[in-house]
Image (tube, grey):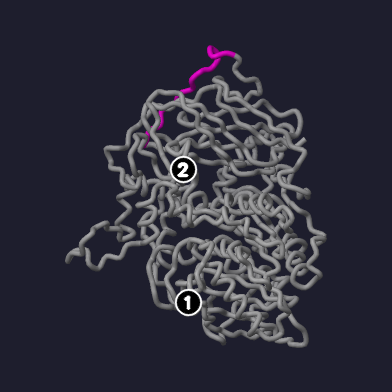
Amino acid sequence: MKYLFKLSIILLLFISSCTPKTATEKEAKATIKDTYVKDNYNKKEVNIPMRDGNKLHTTIYSPKDTSKVYPILLQRTPYSCRPYGDDKFRTKIGPNLNLMKEGNIVVYQDVRGRWMSEGVYDNMRAYIPNKTAKQTDETSDTYDTIDWLVKNITNNNGKVGTWGISYPGHYATISTIDAHPALKAASPQACIGDFFFDDFHHNGAFLLSYFNAIPLFGTYKDQPTDSAWYSFPEMKTQDQYQFFLDKGPLKNLNEYFQYDKLDVATAENKDRIDDFFWKEMVEHPNYDSIWQSKGIIQHLNKVPSTVATMIVAGEFDAEDLYGPLETYKNIEKHQPNNYNTLVFGPWDHGGWARNKVQNKVGNYYFGDSISLKFQKEIETKFFNHFLKGDGSKNSGLPEAYVFDTGKKEWKSYDVWPPENTKKEVFFLSENQKLIIVPPVHKKYIKPINFVSDIKHPVPYSEDIKTIFTPRKYMTDDQRFAARRPDVLVFQTEELTEDFTLSGDILAKLNVATTGSAADWIVKVIDVHPADLKNDNKEMQSHLKLSNYHMMVRSEVMRGRFRNSFAKPEPFTPNKKTAVNIKLQDVFHTFKKGHKLQIQVQSTWFPLIDLNPQTYVHNIYKATEKDFKTQTHTVFSDSSIEFSVLK
């Protein structure tokens, strides 16, 4: 029970989308009274019928002041709109405290099949483009909900806005597709775009570190409930690295998810209930029609011009970075005349919704009141303009509001990435230098070898802990990795002037392996000068800002998917092979006196699962004998392509 309680606390952090958070209870009370919502809002719970007859549980908070009309702010969530009961109130509602204080009708809804709503849940339910009268998906559920709200809530002004972080951010995106006419503004924040590239997968690699979260999404239920129907795996250790190393192949985790692929029920297995999300991943290791149908990015050409969108992303979001960036870029691509903006700030997952003054990610401090400034000057103005104002495209807000994580300052641009950028290419030389001069002849292309020992994989963090979903590693000091023989390091000299990256990064590796399978991880690192003093009193005591190796961006490519995520293929042993890895956008200035470093490795444990390093049809079903230590090679004609601000 103690372990489950601890996981429940961690889960509250994971579902940061449910309510804006304060750092401490003391800070929360200093900001606003716990009874503010109860004192100023009426609460009503209703079950709204969908077109197929299922009812979705919905909680409505309406201002007690009925002398004026208000817009509706709607969040649809799989994480519960608790507390349940007309006499039980949240202490904070809406996207931020400003919007709560000034008065809005705030609505929360349990999505289909979750908590108190009827129906059966489907993880990232597929969108149906041409539905029949009774067919439903999340777009129709959102449409039917908004239609009911504007027709049945008194004192509403007929305008609706949607918002949410993480999974609720996905539902905010969904609301814009085949949108109800009353929907005028949507802010998908850290929104999931495609589950093969967000959260549980990165370029085909399974994020083993999210192991604990699987039952949250995959435990079956078909009846409304106000209590958790899922339970979390108990690891019985505080050393996550050793736990997964001892467990071995992924198939050994089946026991935690009651996964038993038997066609016939027997006395032994008749009571087993598979975790349908785990089963889905095990049975669909490639980007097949199942995963493709669940993605929403490909449907963003259906966002009408009547819906204004503000996409919010954390530059150090370990969970959902692909989703918001691709959502913004694809609305821009398909609907260039829409009002569509991006906020890209120095946050981890959902950090912009917190009310803590000091803004840091892990050990790295970025400044004070960054989130509060966003909430007051950007988010509140966005919703007010489109829901209470004239709703014109002249909102007074920037197209792209982005934070330079090196200079620690905000910048505004008319387009993202900025127009005044230039591609610059650096090569990985055999003497561990990062250089701009390419090898001019084959004889100058050198192999750089390292042994990838599956018994001693490279850790993603030097912390010894178990964690529900890791976040702080996104800015972690990478010295511990740079000093390992199975991590290749390439570095510039001290920079003589500022060097600003603004946009995506493309690693173009030329590699080989003695095996037939491998993962490839590339990290972009800002090496700080030796004479820097600590500016964060909360930095872990064993670290110093002196020579700090700050990770700016990182990504993995499961080598089998180098040419196609749908059709994996092995490596030919010892054959030179191209592997390209797209790293998500950054906006970071490597300041004068700093160094730009690239690290290349093949394990990142247990952030991602271990690759057997011999090709198997399905890694989820690999056996112990499939795992082999191999020697990998990176050739010195490998390069990193940056978008550099001029």
Seen from the viewer's position, the closer of residues 447 and 186 is: 186
Query: Looking at the figure, which quarter contains the N terminus?
Result: bottom left
The x and y percentages for residue 58 are 55, 79
- Picture residue at 58% right of the left edge, 76% below the top: 145
Q: Which residues, given as a range, are shown in magenta?
A: 441-455
Quarter-of-image position of residue 237: bottom left
Q: Distance between the residues labelled 2 and 1?
A: 35 Å
Q: Earlier in the sequence, mark 2 or mark 1?
A: 1
For the residue marked with disc 1, what is the amino acid?
Asp
Quarter-of-image position of residue 109: bottom right
Q: Are marks 2 and 1 in contact (CB under 8 Å)?
A: no
Residue 565 is tagged as 2
The x and y percentages for residue 423 are 69, 32
Which element is circle 1 on?
loop
Instruction: Please determine whether, in this image, residue 4 is positioned above or below residue 194.
Output: below
Does 452 appear in magenta?
yes
